[in-house]
């Protein structure tokens, strides 16, 4: 497409991204991430009680990606399902899994964000094909009598903005969504369509509010927050949101330069990088936040 490294870097902050090999799928990436997380958590797959895969790029509507991961892992006692909340999928999954543990329904859960976005891009559309990458990340949550973990969450949606960012399902030609005509005009079917400018404007309006609301729900203030781990869509959205919250950029984990926008995978990937760099310290208050297709957005506050 007609673009340049300079344009991409200055508008998005992206330098590199990863593209899955032909042998890899969303399920194999998700499995690798989950298997590594279980090793770190010192848990055998047979102990896992719930597997949630947040993804917009499953190979199948059913069987779910989560069921394939369950099988690959040999997690013989786990329930498993996919969660569809686009780029906010990991935040939604973290919230759901924590509540399942807090209610006593399960003792632990593996939450995975996994995507092969490269397979659903229109590679002729320079407004989208330069943004997205492939990847997967996973966390293991366990119930504990020690205070901490997920403290509060806020989940929000506005379906009236669905036409701003969409990916049609593969099984039929969907009816055009109500909204601006141009979105699916000239787009290949079953590829991502986006009005980048509208998404950008919406993102910078709502995310900071949901973070502040969630921190308040946890009975804390923004001064207590050690680190923000945002969805990695665009450096300018990340910077704008941090500014709105009054959080300095050295309290924000940024990986968009290395991964691009990996949708539901971006936050667990950023957590993984943050952990490897020693930035996530036990007892720190950490906030994850995301916005994406739906529109769906939200935030989770957790004590690491
Ligand atoms: N290379 C070069 N030029 C490009 C381009 C590319 N890859 N993509 C778009 N352009 C052009 C446009 O055609 C337009 O040209 P024109 O003025 O001649 O019409 C110009 O750049 C400006 O386009 P615009 O869409 O206004 O650019 P922008 O500053 O908004 O940046 C995005 C585009 C996509 C980078 C930006 O809108 C964005 O990041 N939005 C949020 C998207 C996102 O994060 N979505 C996922 C949320 S989960």
Image (tube, rainbow, N blue to C red):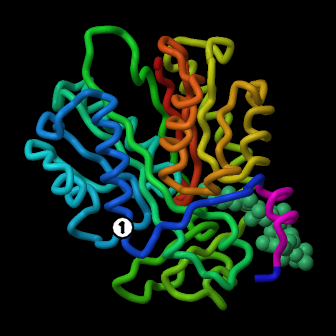
Residue extending farthest left: 76
Q: Badge 1, how many Cα within 10 Å: few under 14, some, many 20+?
A: many
Quick check: can you spot residue 44? yes
* Residue 128 placement, left or right of 66: right
User: x, y percentage for residue 256?
Assistant: 67, 49
Residue hosting label 1: 58
> Is 109 located above or below residue 266 in the figure?
above
Residue 261 in the image, given as x and y percentages of width and height: 61, 56
Question: Quick one: 217 or 268, which is closer to the camera?
Answer: 268
Q: Is residue 78 above or below residue 64?
A: above
Instruction: Using the rendered image of the protein, determine whether residue 98 is visible from the camera's viewpoint.
Output: no
**Could you say where residue 39 lies in the image, as x and y percent from the top left?**
29, 34
Query: From the viewer's perspective, is residue 94 above or below residue 175?
Result: above
| Residue at 65%, 51% in the rendered image | 258
Does 11 appear in magenta?
A: yes
* Picture quarter with the N terminus: bottom right
Residue 302 place in picture, x, y as percent: 47, 23
From the Cβ of disc 1, is ligand 1 less than 8 Å away?
no
21 or 83: nearer the viewer: 21
Q: In which quarter of the image is ligand 1?
A: bottom right
Q: Front-most of 216 and 264?
A: 264
Asked if residue 106 is among those painted magenta in the image, a careful observer would answer no
Quarter of the image where one finds residue 18: bottom right
């Amino acid at each position: 497409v007609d673009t340049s490294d300079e344009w991409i870097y200055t508008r998005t902050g992206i330098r590199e991204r990863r593209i899955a090999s032909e042998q890899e799928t969303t399920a194999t990436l998700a499995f690798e991430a989950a298997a590594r997380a279980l090793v770190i958590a010192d848990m055998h797959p047979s102990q896992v009680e719930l597997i949630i895969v947040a993804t917009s790029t499953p190979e199948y509507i059913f069987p779910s990606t989560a069921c394939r991961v369950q099988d690959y892992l040999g997690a013989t006692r786990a329930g498993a399902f996919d969660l569809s909340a686009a780029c906010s999928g990991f935040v939604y999954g973290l919230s759901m899994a924590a509540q399942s543990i807090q209610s006593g329904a399960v003792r632990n859960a593996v939450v995975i964000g996994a995507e092969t976005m490269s397979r659903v891009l229109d590679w002729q559309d320079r407004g989208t094909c330069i943004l997205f990458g492939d990847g997967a990340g996973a966390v293991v949550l366990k119930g504990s009598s020690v205070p901490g973990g997920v403290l509060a969450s806020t989940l929000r949606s506005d379906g009236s903005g669905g036409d701003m960012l969409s990916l049609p399902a593969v099984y039929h030609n969907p009816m055009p969504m109500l909204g601006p005509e141009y979105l699916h005009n000239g787009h290949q079917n079953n590829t991502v369509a986006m009005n980048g400018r509208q998404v950008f404007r919406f993102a910078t309006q709502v995310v900071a509010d949901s973070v502040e609301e969630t921190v308040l729900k946890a009975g804390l203030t923004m001064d207590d927050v050690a680190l923000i781990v945002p969805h990695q869509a665009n450096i300018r959205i990340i910077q704008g949101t941090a500014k709105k919250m009054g959080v300095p950029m050295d309290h924000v984990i940024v990986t968009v330069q290395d991964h691009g926008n990996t949708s539901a995978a971006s936050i667990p990937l950023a957590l993984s990088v943050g952990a490897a760099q020693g930035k996530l310290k036990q007892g720190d208050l950490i906030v994850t936040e995301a916005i994406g297709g739906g529109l769906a957005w939200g935030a989770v506050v957790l004590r690491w």
